[in-house]
Image (cartoon, grey):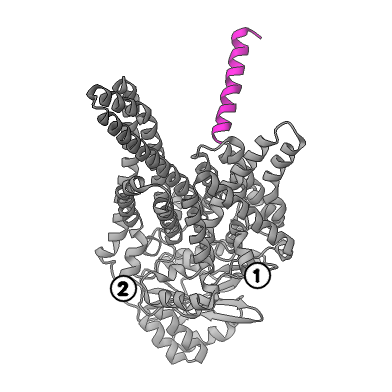
């Protein structure tokens, strides 16, 4: 090999090493995602499990855009999936979304200035913990993107806070020095002190840090808005806690108000796609007081609920719990790992902001488990617009887990450096990376192969196309149940897919039965038309069902004959005046019915699209503004040394 060839090889290897060092968190998250999602990534088909529902082609409609006038539960999540489905197969869209959430975690960690080992350990704990595992198990993929957005928001807000603190410290120091020189009654010395302060202020570095922070926050805002209401609320709380936590100094705190105001305006505009339809269309009496207790955090294993929350677990949904957490040792060890991480983060990243984050997350997560606070939370959920976002409190543990993971990485890196040259360094290195995996081994390889991919029956998509061709009225899906078990899906519980298979409005059961001990608590739904249909089915009254379908403008009925109570429901639908839909092809386990008298579907009022338009415009402004600010700051940084000379 020639010298030039050898140099080129070494140069390429060095470049690859530098790239890997810059993106260590991203690579660590990618490895974790491969181990967790492996079977789903390697095979075609859909993972259908509880709320994890993707379809071959999600239609771009009033329902997915949030302009149909109903409660915007999956806005704008479904709209983003529908846009991706325009160019990708539905199962590929699902894989990209799940994998992308993990990659976004590591990319957010890489935005910080931590050492390589710290970023690797932090990314592993961020991707492999009870919070992520239980949200995957229940199918809340939108929450995972909101969780990733929290990482970007916290890293960016911490960096912005440090930049403001350094700037205010420089200003205060310069003023003190100038005052000292003034007292010396030397004008030349005053100018010397000021020039020296400008040089020491490192204007270029501060501008670069501030730009880097603003870009991270901009990404967090856009990502959280795309993830839905939960992610948006998590990011808003994270930014507020870090920005206004005590300890930054009076000048830095005052300097944070202007960017905080702009950030708040951007947040409001970006999230208009879900809060606008909620305020203008959601029924005011839809909330159910039973939901506060039903969705309160619970112990997901051995020990009290607070031990579960400290370790990142505690979801209310018992089927999402992992068997290994029945060991008290595992629960306590998980809590200690997170607690050690939070303490380390407070020492290295700032006691004020980390404490504010941790306290906010744990308080909101556990408030519904405390008798007195549960009453307060109930009043908020029932009477405050948007208060329902606080109902599933355990999701706020994300504000505890993120700083815990960042601090865990810093702690392991410090221990390895301290023990360098001894066997303890290797022990700390291996332990820091492996500990999250050992504490939750059941998450590996799609929960030990339980999460498998399947294909929809080909006849289902054909029936969906046939029904969509009939544009009038809504579709009623029976038997009455929120969740289904299908033989073709391995009898796994899944949210009824027909809500997403059809383009038009779907009337389906939206109540939720939550197991609590040996009993079941039913939380009422929010659609009054669905409630009327449910009452008619309970009373087995054909006349009542006919009236309910007429008020809901139902023109088609789907009866899934492989579900419990299908025969009785079919007879009730026939007695209510529906007739078999002759145009539909015969399909096993499905019958379709026509209901006469449905009126043409009214056009969507233009004002219902205001929220969506506002979100799109704000997103464009935020993206362009962040890019333009970056270019201007880089130019200013390049000129700074000349200005200081």
Give the magenta-colored segment's residue range. Answer: 1-23
329 to 217, vertically: above or below: below
Indicate the quadrant containing the N terminus: top left, top right, bottom left or bottom right. top right
Label 2 close to label 1 by CB (< 8 Å) = no
Indicate the quadrant containing the C terminus: top left, top right, bottom left or bottom right. top left
User: Does the magenta-highlighted stretch encompass residue 11?
Assistant: yes
Asked whether 255 or 296 is in front, the reply is: 255
Asked whether 269 or 261 is in front, the reply is: 261
User: Does the magenta-highlighted stretch encompass residue 610?
Assistant: no
Q: Is residue 110 among what the camera can see?
A: yes
604 to 598, vertically: above or below: above
Name the side, left or right, on which 619 lies relative to 379. Answer: left
Disc 2 and disc 1: Cα gap in Å? Answer: 55 Å
Determine which of the numbered discs, if any, sits on residue 600 in the image. Answer: 2
Disc 2 is placed on an element classified as loop
Residue 268: percent from left, percent from top: 32, 57
Residue 611, image quadrant:
bottom left
Residue behind mark 1: 304
Query: Of label 2 and label 1, which has the lower sequence position?
Result: 1
Task: Bin the neighbour count of mark 2 within 10 Å (Cα to Cα): few under 14, some 14-19, many 20 and up.
Answer: few
């Amino acid at each position: 090999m020639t010298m030039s060839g050898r140099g080129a090889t070494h140069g390429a290897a060095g470049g690859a090493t530098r790239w890997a060092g810059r993106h260590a968190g991203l690579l660590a998250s990618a490895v974790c995602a491969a181990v967790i999602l492996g079977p789903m990534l390697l095979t075609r088909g859909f993972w259908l499990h509880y709320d994890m529902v993707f379809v071959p082609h999600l239609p771009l409609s009033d329902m997915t855009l949030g302009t149909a006038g109903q409660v915007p539960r999956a806005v704008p999540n479904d709209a983003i999936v529908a846009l991706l489905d325009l160019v990708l197969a539905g199962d590929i869209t699902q894989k990209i979304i799940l994998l992308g959430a993990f990659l976004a975690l590591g990319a957010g960690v890489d935005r910080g200035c931590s050492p390589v080992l710290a970023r690797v350990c932090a990314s592993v704990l961020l991707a492999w913990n009870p919070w992520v595992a239980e949200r995957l198990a229940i199918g809340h993929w939108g929450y995972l993107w909101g969780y990733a957005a929290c990482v970007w928001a916290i890293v960016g807000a911490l960096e912005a806070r440090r930049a403001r603190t350094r700037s205010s410290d420089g200003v205060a120091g310069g003023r003190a020095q100038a005052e000292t020189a003034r007292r010396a009654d030397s004008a030349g010395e005053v100018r010397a002190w000021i020039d020296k302060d400008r040089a020491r202020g490192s204007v270029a570095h501060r501008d670069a840090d501030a730009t880097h922070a603003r870009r991270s926050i901009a990404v967090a805002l856009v990502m959280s808005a795309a993830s839905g209401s939960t992610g948006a609320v998590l990011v808003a709380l994270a930014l507020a806690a870090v920005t206004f936590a005590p300890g930054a100094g009076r000048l830095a705190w005052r300097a944070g108000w202007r960017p905080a105001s702009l950030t708040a305006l951007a947040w409001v505009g970006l999230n208009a796609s879900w809060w606008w339809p909620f305020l203008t269309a959601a029924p005011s009496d839809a909330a159910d007081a039973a939901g506060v207790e039903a969705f309160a955090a619970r112990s997901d294993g051995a020990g009290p609920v607070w031990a579960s929350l400290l370790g990142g677990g505690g979801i209310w949904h018992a089927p999402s719990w992992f068997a290994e957490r029945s060991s008290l040792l595992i629960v306590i060890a998980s809590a200690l790992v997170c607690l050690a991480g939070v303490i380390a983060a407070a020492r290295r990243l700032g006691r004020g902001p980390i404490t504010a984050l941790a306290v906010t997350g744990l308080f909101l997560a556990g408030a519904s488990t405390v008798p007195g606070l549960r009453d307060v939370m109930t009043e908020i959920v029932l009477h405050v617009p948007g208060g329902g976002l606080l109902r599933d409190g355990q999701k706020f543990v994300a504000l505890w887990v993120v700083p815990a993971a960042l601090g865990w990485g810093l702690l392991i890196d410090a221990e390895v450096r301290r023990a360098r040259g001894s066997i303890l360094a290797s022990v700390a290195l291996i332990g820091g990376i492996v500990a999250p995996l050992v504490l939750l081994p059941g998450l590996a390889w799609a929960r030990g192969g339980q999460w498998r991919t399947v294909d929809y029956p080909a006849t289902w998509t054909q029936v969906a196309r046939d029904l969509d061709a009939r544009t009038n009225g809504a579709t009623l899906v029976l038997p009455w149940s929120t969740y289904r078990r299908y033989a073709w899906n391995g009898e796994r519980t899944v949210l009824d897919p027909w809500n997403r298979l059809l383009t038009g409005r779907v009337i389906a059961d939206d109540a939720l039965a939550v197991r609590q001990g040996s009993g079941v608590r039913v939380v009422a739904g929010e659609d009054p038309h669905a409630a009327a249909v449910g009452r008619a089915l309970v009373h087995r009254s054909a006349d009542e069902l006919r009236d309910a379908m007429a008020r809901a403008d139902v023109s088609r009925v789907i009866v899934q004959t492989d579900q419990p109570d299908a025969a009785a429901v079919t007879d009730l639908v026939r007695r209510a005046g529906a007739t078999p839909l002759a145009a539909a092809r015969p399909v096993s386990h499905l019958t379709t019915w026509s209901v006469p008298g449905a009126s043409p579907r009214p056009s969507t009022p233009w004002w219902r699209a205001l929220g969506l338009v506002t979100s799109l415009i704000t997103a464009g402004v935020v993206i362009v503004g962040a890019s333009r600010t970056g270019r201007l700051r880089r130019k200013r940084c390049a000129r700074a040394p000349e200005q200081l000379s």
